[in-house]
Amino acid sequence: MSLLYPQMFLLLFVVAWLYRVSNRRSKLLFGALVLVVVALTRPVIVTHKKQRVDAREFIIAVDLSYSMMADDLQPNRLEASKQKIATLLDRYPKDSFALLAFTTNPLILSPSTTDHRLIIEALNSIKIENILTKGTDFLPLLKRVAKMQTHAKNLIIFSDGGDIDSGSLEKLVSVAKKEGIKVYAVTVATKRGSTIKDKYGNLLKQDGHLVISRANPLFAEFAKQSGGRNFGVKDALVLSEISTKESKKSATIKEELFIYPLFLAMILVLIYFVKIPRKVLLLVPFLANLSEAGMLDWYYIKKANELYENGDAKASLGYFERVEPSFERDFNLALIYYKLGIYSKSKDTLLNLSTKDPKKKQKVLFMLGNIEAKEKSYAKAKQFYMMALNLGYNKKIIENLKIIAFKKDSYKREQKKRGAKTKGKIKEQIKQSSKGAKREKKGDSDNKNLSRVIGYKAYELINKGYIDEKNPW
């Protein structure tokens, strides 16, 4: 066990002073204060667990030199880079990214994380009016990336190429290969180039001549020689071809214990201020069961979410099952069953959910569609996806619908294989039935019903496993 805020123990001196100067030295009251101080220290049980991570790792570096203010890309090169990075993060949600900004020196804006919201916030914190440095140096950037503790050194640089020349190119390539860094260059500039305005709106000049900033062709060459490739800012960044080794990361799980001293402190305060009759004491076992049923729900939910995010779905399932039934609890249970491959339980849980909220209904229908798709019941999956889309536009649902649009259910494929073998037998049965029908008397109503020919369509229904018994043909 460890304490997150051990400095809170200093409050015990205050409690001791109050006990000394107080006229009413009640052990119950001051015992409660001591327990409150213990709760404030946030006692936790810390466990370290290594888990496998399939996510690939990338490092994004954004050039913040003065030339990134050029407007040959609208609204300017920096804003175009930020928009491209946001699209990249949205396209690869499971991968881990780190964010660096650099001019002549690099600065880490966000460490490697799969929480892309942090990177977006870091991007939004970059303001173009704060850009003052005019130079771009890639060498300090490479050295900083080499020191970063990541399993893969896939470096994606958003820049116009800066001042790379033939002399510096050889050195940059040498450092990149030595440190195992693959550079993926995203050229944020045009060949035609553009003038640059200062913060007062005046065109930037050097030695009396207008400064024209263009895309540096050696930037793309730098990427290719390092083992990476070059992209234009309008190109789609295809990172699916980049593969990294499966890695293990240690996850720290903290189990909060402050609730226990706080609960005891509340009991002592109640005993001190309230004279509890014997009849109320008889309700203590009932209250204990009640608190166990609902009071700790927040803790179980928090613990279950932590375990689920760390990849331990089975342990997460145990905590969710302790929570009082609700839509959120049951939906989370269905998600875990789905992740564990227990599709029947996941489906039953979702079908028992009821809500009037259209967004929640859409989530349920989307999940049901995913389950049917996993079980290769594509016709049902399409129905659920279409029902979900009726409740509002959703990009993920449309993407899933496109994937299964032309797929056929597994039982239909099997039936098609058996069709050639059984077709002859079915025709023979139809012939025999028709011959029997001719021999029957037309006036006998009972025999007439028995002598009806079962059509080919009826045999299809029987093979599928369902038929209307009242009107089978």
Image (cartoon, grey):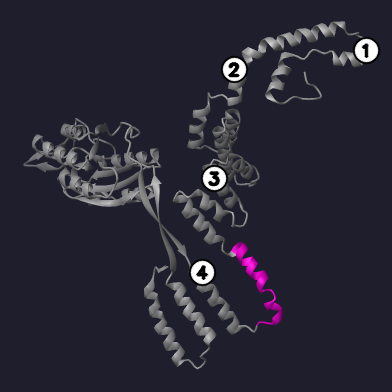
Q: Is residue 136 visible?
A: no
For the residues marked 1 and 2, what is the alpha-carbon distance in whole angstroms? 41 Å
The stretch drawn in magenta includes residue 289: yes
Q: Earlier in the sequence, mark 1 or mark 4?
A: 4
Q: Secondary structure at mark 2?
A: helix
Which is nearer the N-term, disc 2 or disc 4?
4
Vertical order, 421 against 207 (above or below): above
Q: Secondary structure at mark 3?
A: helix
- The three-letter amino acid code for the residue at tag 3 is Leu
- Name the image quarter holding the N terminus: bottom left
Residue linked to disc 1: 444
Q: CA distance from mark 1 to mark 4?
A: 83 Å
Mark in the foreground, 2 or 4:
2
Single out the residue that lies furthest toward the bottom. 23
Q: Amino acid at mark 1?
A: Asp
Label 3 vs 1, first from the N-terminus: 3
Instruction: Give the quarter of the image for residue 232.
Output: top left
Residue beneath disc 3: 335
Q: Is residue 145 visible?
A: yes
Residue on which the image places disc 4? 259
The front one of 163 and 287 is: 287
In the image, is residue 272 above or below residue 87?
Answer: below
* Three-letter amino acid code of the residue under disc 2: Lys
Element class at badge 1:
loop
Q: Across the whole image, how many numbered discs are drawn on residues?
A: 4
Quarter of the figure with residue 281: bottom right
